[in-house]
Amino acid sequence: MRRSCIRSRPAASLTITAGAFPVERRREIMESMRTIFVSALAVGLLAAAEIKLGKPLTVKDPTPIATLLAKPADYVGKSVQIKGKVTEVCQMMGCWIDLVDDRDQKLRVKVNDGDIEFPKNATGKVAVAEGRFDKIELSQKEAAAQAEEEAQERGRKADPSKIKGPVTVYQIQGTGAVIFDN
C-alpha cells in the first residue's frame, strides 16, 4: 500500500532533482536575481522621485522668474519654462501652484480645471513648469473678487479696500510640469 508518491520514490531521484544545477551555477542565478531585483527597485525609486503632470516639457531650458518679471513684455504670449520651489498650491482643485526662485520672485502657474491637478502636498518641493506667459489686466472690481476667492481658498478674510485701481498680473497658463521629491 502506497502512502504517498514522495515516499515511494527512491532517494536518488530527489538528489538528481535537487542537484540539477551545480552549486556554482545556483550562486550565479541567485546573484543575477539579486541584481535584477536591485535594478528594479532603483528604477522604481527614481520614478517615484518625480511626478510628471500634463504634456511633456518641450522648452529646452528654464527662464529665471526674475527675468520674466523684469522684462515681461519680451515674453508675453510665448511658451516659457520656469523652475522654482512650490510655495503654495490651490487646495480646492489643484488648479494652480506658486513657484518662487532663489531671489524670492514669485510666479503662478495656472491650469484649466481638470487639465492638470497639482498635488496638494507639493508645497516645499522643487518644480519645473511650462506654458504660455500671460499678462492679465484686472479692474479694481475683478482684482477684489480674485482676492476674495483666494482668501476663501485659504480660509482667511479678504480686505477689498486694500486694492486700489486696476491690477496687472503675470502668470503662466500651464501645459505641463514635473514636481521633484526633494
Image: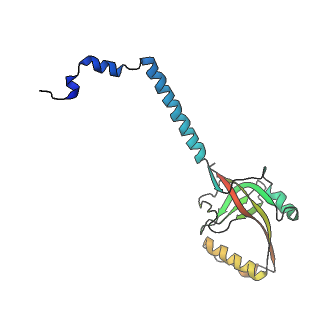
For image coordinates 58% across by 40% down, the residue present is: 43
Towards the viewer: 47 or 9: 9
Height in image: 58 above or below 13? below
Q: Position of residue 89 (x, y in %)?
A: 64, 63
Residue 124 picture quarter: bottom right
Height in image: 46 above or below 112? above
Numbered circles on residues, count: 0
For image coordinates 36% across by 19% down, the residue present is: 19
Towards the viewer: 97 or 87: 97
Towards the viewer: 83 or 31: 31
For image coordinates 20% across by 24% down, the residue present is: 7
Horizontal relation, residue 51 to residue 147: left or right: left
Residue 70 picture quarter: bottom right
Height in image: 56 above or below 46? below
Q: Position of residue 125 (x, y in %)?
A: 65, 53
For image coordinates 46% across by 26% down, the residue present is: 30
Residue 85 picture quarter: bottom right
